[in-house]
Image (cartoon, rainbow, N blue to C red):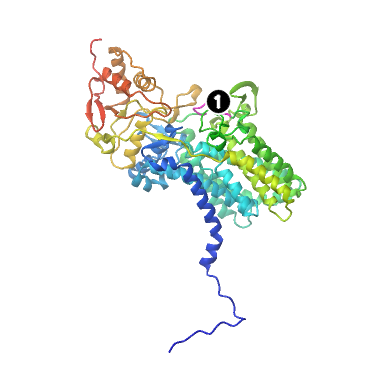
Amino acid sequence: MSVVAAPPSESAEPPATSPARRGLAVWRPHLIVAFAALALAGYLTFGLWRDPSGRGLAENLGDQAFFEWLLGYGVYTLGHGADPFYTWLLNAPFGVNLAANTSITVYTTTFAPLTLLAGPQVSFVTILTLNLAGSAFAWYLFLQRFVVERRAAAVLGGFFCGFAPGFVSHANGHLNWSAGWVAPVLLWWVLRMREPGRWLRHGVILGVLVAAAFSIAAEGLFFTALACGVFVLVWSLAPATRAEARAAVPTMLAGLGVTAAVSGLLLAYPLYMHFGGPRTFTGTGFDQAYFAEDLKAYIEYPTRSLAAAVGFGSDLAPNQTEETSYFGLPLVVLVLVALAWLCWRAAPGRRATLAALTTVGVVFLVLSWGPLAKIDKKPTDVELPYEALRHLPLFDSALPARLALVVVGVIGIVLAFTVDRLLSAQRPARSVRALWAAGFAVALVPLFPTPLPTKERATEPAFIADGIWRQYIGENGIMTALPFATTDTQDGQRWQAYTMARGGAQFRMPGGYFLGPGGPNGTGRMGAPARHTDWMFFEAGYYGTVPEIDDGDRRRARADFAYWGVELVFLPDEITGSHTTLYRRSVEATATALLGEPERVGGVQLWRIRPGIDPANRGN
């Protein structure tokens, strides 16, 4: 017997949609935006994805090697129970205070399984790609939730913030500053703090996020907090929003108190190490006047853009990793016109928001110019407000140019507001909308980013890759590649990163690329102060200089090798410079003249060192 269901009556209820289908319908647009962001990020980082081990970022191999080292150290930390904020593996015999550097501990721990499985090179490009995509997606979600009503407005503002010239520029090696998602995530939970009855929950969540943000980008966390403070102050003083601000004070203070307690507990040790731990320092290892925005930078175009591809790029930045503004004149004009248009006939509350937003933009614009104004890379004697702040705690460690990244968020919000109004029920006439569309195209199309440039870098020698070095020194023994590792000659630090990522025994090394003490007046500096021997090898590799070696040089080398505790030095068949081609033959000639003929093992030439004995005098 077959049973055929009767057709439903006209009054029957339509079949209910399952929760899974409803959830998919809600998230489908978000997933499309996320996929688009990931695709654009993959397009920018494709040069690294082609060969993560054999290629590096052409503009900043030094910082890439440093972050790969941190990722390798994450595996070492978990496997050996080592201190994540201080290492003895670099800068032998003294070590390095990683809390005073950018330790990215959250990343090194979270991605440790991937690093162990595929190496720091793969983890590096993975994090870099997710940083860029996540920044655009996080800003999109934030704008959609708190700022605008229309999805198109949130998409445009989010993608501008995530792929703005400053963040694309920092993607040349910086896993900290490419993490533009930190700001919208923090702002999300700051705004949710006003919800009544949830101050404890939201305070705990924000406290955990603050601790994570400190690990990833402490300088960015400081800038975000400073921007929040400026915005809240101006917004709270506006007559239209004063009552709303006053009503939110008790809940906000309670929640922020919880945030301070939670983040303080989580950051107690890192903060101690950062400010009072061994081998810490004050200030920064960089010149704040040099790393400040040129007054013309805001109206210039960035190097990695369509505008630059057709000849409209600029070289005003200290380097291509620090092009933090570079919005182009059309975008600057568009934003100024948009602000005036948004304020015209705006409700008092919206005007208060725009006034606070504009104040944040102006404050960070001026501060990004640094202590002294400069035009066309030429310093002037005109002192700017940052001069009064540069010796204050936190400000003394910041690079002023990076304050321009806050202006990115301001511009992104203004663009989102503008598109939202253009698409609203009160939108202007079609001809006016067409004029705005043309303005957006002229302002934004030239800024469309082009892929990050990459270049080949030295292949890891079998001496390292196959663990042959373990036959020559014991665990925690000290050896170094030639030339010694610095920001310009980073290979030795890479080799140590790769051995850490594989687990097991590990060697230590002198020198390295890091921030440590040794600068003027107690400030920091890059790397360890050079001694006679490592500087001799640096000059050989960087400048091609082969010195006349005599017993005086050998006596100094004996003292230097004993000072570091070095047991072995080696020279791979390939060496890579961060910014220039290195002179390998000059390094080999210098090492041979100093130490004698080398052994040939596993794709390297090596020289064993008996501390206090080698190199022996030769009577010249």
Please name whichever residue, 368 or 414, is drawn nearer the observer in this view of the structure: 414
Please, is residue 140 above or below residue 166 in the view?
A: below
Q: Is residue 290 magenta?
A: yes
Q: Is residue 208 visible?
A: no
The quadrant holding residue 517 is top left
Q: Residue 136 in the image: state x and y as whole percent.
A: 55, 47
Question: Which image quadrant: the C terminus?
Answer: top left
Dominant SS of magenta comes to loop
- For the point 67% across and 36% down, the residue is 362
| Apparent side of residue 97 relative to residue 548 in the rendered image (left or right) | right
- For the point 31% across and 15% down, the residue is 553
Q: Is residue 309 visible?
A: yes
Please name whichever residue, 581 or 353, is drawn nearer the observer in this view of the structure: 581
The quadrant holding residue 62 is top left
Please name whichever residue, 79 or 115, is drawn nearer the observer in this view of the structure: 115
The amino acid type of the residue labelled 1 equals Tyr
| Apparent side of residue 400 relative to residue 359 in the rendered image (left or right) | left
Q: Residue 237 in the image: state x and y as whole percent.
A: 73, 43
Element assignment for label 1: loop
Question: Which image quadrant: the N terminus?
Answer: bottom left
Residue highlighted by disc 1: 290
The stretch of residues the image draws in magenta is 283-292
Instruction: Identify the residue at the far right of this view.
Output: 345
Q: Is residue 177 magenta?
A: no
Q: Residue 138 in the image: state x and y as whole percent.
A: 55, 49
Count of marks, rendered view: 1
| Apparent side of residue 103 relative to residue 88 in the rendered image (left or right) | right
- For the point 31% across and 42% down, the residue is 502
Please, is residue 576 above or below residue 380 in the view?
A: below
